[in-house]
Amino acid sequence: MKKNPFLQLGVIALSLLSSASFGQTGTLNISTDSKTTISKHIYGQFAEHLGHGIYGGFWVDKTLPVKKQDRIRLDIVDALKKIKIPNLRWPGGCFADEYHWRDGIGPATARPRMVNTNWGGITEDNSFGTHEFLELCDLLGCEPYIAGNVGSGTVDEMSKWIEYLNSNSSSTVVQLRKKNGHPAPYKVTYWGVGNESWGCGGNMTPEYYSDLFKRYASFAKDYPGAKLKKIASGPNSDDYRWTEVCMKNISSGMMAGLSLHYYTIPTGNWGKKGSATNFDEKEYFSTMVNCLKMEELVTKHSAIMDKYDPEKKVALVVDEWGVWTDPEPGTNPGFLYQQNSLRDALIAGTTLNIFNNHSGRVKMAALAQTINVLQALILTDKEKMVLTPTYHVFDMYKVHQDAKYLPIKLSVPDYEVDGKKIEAVNASASQDAAGKVHISLVNLDPHNTITITTGLSDIKWQTVSGQVLTSAKLTDVNTFKDADKIHLNAFTGAKKDGDKLVVSLPAKSIVTLELK
C-alpha cells in the first residue's frame, strides 16, 4: 500500500460551556511531503522615522540612564536578539520618499535638520542616519533592508547610496564612506525601490511605476559580495491590478520581490479605526475578520504572480502588516502610538500562521512597527521598557525560522458572533534541522477550550512540551506599572496518550508545541 503523505492527526472536539451540548469536531492533517522552507525573513521588523520609533526608541538621549552603545539602547537590542529578528526595514515607510541619505552621514553636529512632514511635523536633527542604522543592524545580528527614495529622490541619488555602502573602489563617494569611519563595504543586499508608490510615495499608476522601477533598478549596481535583492513597491491591500501590471512589465530577473501592505483595522473604517484597549466582543470579532483577510490577499496576489513567475523566483514581501487602531488618548496623533493587547497577540499569531502556510511565495515580511509605533514589540517611556504580547508571539514562533514547512489541512469549529462565523482555530507546522516538529495553534474563540486529539504514528517522538500565551481578558495589556501581566507560560495542556497527542487549547490563546 502506498504511504499516505498526510499524517492523520485525529479528531478535534470543541468543549462548549453548555453541558447540554455534545461539542463540535474537526480534523487536522499534516503532510511531511514538502520541499519548502519557511524563510526566517518572514519574521522581519520595520523601523520608520515616526513618533518615538527611532528617536526615543532605538536612539536615545546621551543622558538617559540606560546601557547604550553610542546612543543605541542596548536593552532593546538584547530583547530583539532573543527573538532572532532576521531583518530590519528602514527608514520608512512614507518617510523613505522624503529622506535624502547624504543628510544623515558625516559629523552629527554638521548634519542638516529636517522637518518630518509625514509624521507629526517635528524637526529631526539627522543624528540617526545610515552608519547608525547599520551599526544597529550589526548589534542585532540582522540583515538591513533599506527603502530607497523614489518619490522625491533621483536615480543618481539611490545609485550613489548603493555605491557608498557596497563598493570598495577608489571613487569619491567610497572615499567619503571611509572618511566617515567605515573602510570596508557594508554589503547591503536588500533594497526597496520606493515605498507605497501608489500613495504617499508619489501617487503613481502601476504602468508609470513599473517603468520607473526598471529605470532605478538598471542603475542599482551589484558590487563584489553584494548582489542586490531589489524589491518593487507592490500593491495596497486588494489592488490586484497593480500586481498584474508589475508582474507583466517587470522581469523576474530584475526584481527579487514585490511588496504588499495590509493593515488590520478593527472597525474597517480608516476614519475611526477603534480603540486599542476599549472594545467589546463584537469589535473583537470584526477585527479578527479583517485580520483573516490576509489569507485572501496572499492567495489572490500569489495566483497572479504564479501566472508570470511559475518558478516563484519573485517573493511576495509583506513588509507592512499589523493592527492599526486610533492613537492612545493624549498622545500626538502623528506618532501612531497605541497599546498592545491580547487581541494583538492573536492577530500576530494568526498572521504568522498565514505567512508560514504560504511560505512558497511569502519569503519576507515586516511587522509595523518595532518600537513605540502601531503594533509594536516594545514600548518605552524614558528609561522604562515593556515587552508587549506581540513580542511574546514572535518569541514563541522563532522556532519556525528556516525550518521545513509542513503543509496542513484544517477542519475546525466555528466561532460565531451575531450570526457571522470564522474558523475558531488556525495553525501552522514545521520541522527543524534536528527533526523536532513544531506546531503553532491559535484559538480565536474567547469562551471555549478546544480539545485536539492527534494521531502521530508516522512521526517518531517521545515527549511534548510547549508554551502558551493568554490572559483573563482580550483587552489586557502590559504597562509600565504591570509589565508582566501577559507573559509566556509553560504549557501543560498537552500529553502523550499512546501514539496520540492530546491538546487542550485554552480560549483566546496562542500555543506552540515541540515534539521530539
Image (tube, rainbow, N blue to C red):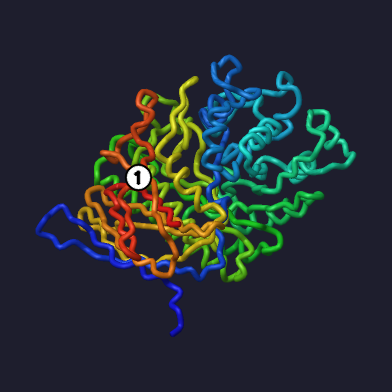
> In this rendering, would 7 be left or right of 261?
left
Taking 24 as reference, is 269 above or below it? Answer: above
Which one is in front, 226 or 470? 470
Q: Nearer the viewer, residue 162 or 353?
A: 353
* Residue 164 seen in the current view: yes
Horizontal side of residue 207 vs 474, given as left or right: right
Query: How many residues crowd around disc 1 within 10 Å: few (fewer than 14), some, or many (20 or more)?
Result: many
Quadrant of the rendered image containing residue 185: top right
**Is residue 341 shown left or right of residue 186?**
left
Residue at the far right in the pictured view: 170
Q: Which x, y percent locates residue 311?
A: 62, 69
Circle 1 residue: 266
- Picture residue at 35% right of the left edge, 26% below the top: 482
- Residue 220, placed above or below residue 334: below
Residue at the spot 47% in from the left edge and 50% down from the top edge: 262
Where residue 370 appears, x then y in whole percent? 51, 37
Can residue 294 be seen here? no
Residue at x 28%, y 45% (from the top left corner): 283
The C terminus lies in which quarter of the figure? bottom left
Image quarter of the N terminus: bottom left
Q: Secondary structure at mark 1?
A: loop
Q: Is the residue 374 above or below the residue 261 in the image?
A: above
Of residues 232 and 165, the one nearer the viewer is 165
**In the picture provided, is 253 more to the left or to the right than 30?**
right
Residue 325 location, x and y as percent? 39, 39
Furthest residue to the top? 63
Q: Callout 1, which amino acid? A: Pro
